[in-house]
Amino acid sequence: MLVKKVGEIKGTEREVYAENNNWVSRRLLLKKDGMGFSFNETIIFAGTETPIWYTHHLEAVYCIEGEGEVELADTGEIIPISPGTLYALDKHDRHLLRAKESDMRLVCVFIPPLTGREVHREDGSYEPDE
Ligand code: 9YT
């Protein structure tokens, strides 16, 4: 059995900051952990807007703290995010992710799993594994 504590990940290679400092991702489970998915706790910093388009991954996101919204690029639809909200990018939906006045704490699951140090490329995607 694997046991991970987010507090032990802080300051290690499993803690990844966005290049623009919009978020920090603490990667509790990665590909090398062998579960077939990755599992991160992500803090989206207050007042930020991040363009995202996971062309090679599916992601499910569950909010446990903070308030924000997702704006879908194709339709302009705005989905409010608050604790208890889950959204799943089942269609590789291109979107803008915004956190409001306080940081948002999210649990994020990726398939295929992240391998380690992924950050968004210019188009909002993460590099595929190979
Ligand atoms: C919700 C989202 O995709 N935020 C960006 C960071 C990502 N969750 C990650 O790498 O953990």
Image (cartoon, grey):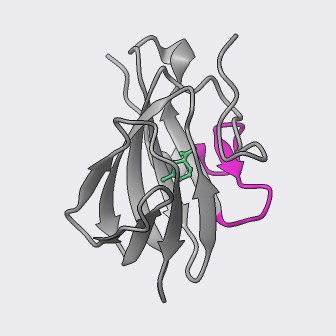
Tally of numbered discs: 0
The x and y percentages for residue 46 are: 55, 80
- Magenta run includes residue 92: no
Report the front residue among 37 and 91. 91
Q: Quadrant of the C terminus?
A: top right
Range covered by the magenta-colored residues: 9-22
Q: Is residue 22 left or right of residue 113?
A: right
- Residue at the left extreme? 84
Report the front residue among 65 and 88. 88
Question: Which quadrant of the figure has residue 75?
Answer: bottom left
Which residue occupies 23% across, 61% down? 85
Which residue occupies 49% across, 76% down? 99
The x and y percentages for residue 2 are: 37, 21
The x and y percentages for residue 28 are: 48, 36
Question: Which quadrant of the figure has residue 4?
Answer: top left
Which residue occupies 69% across, 36% down? 118
In the picture shown, does residue 9 fall above or below 103?
above
Which residue occupies 65% across, 39% down? 125
Report the front residue among 40 and 3. 40
Report the front residue among 12 and 26. 26
Q: Is residue 88 left or right of residue 121?
A: left
Assign the magenta stretch its main secondary structure: loop
Question: Which quadrant of the figure has residue 17?
Answer: bottom right
Q: Is residue 35 left or right of residue 129?
A: left
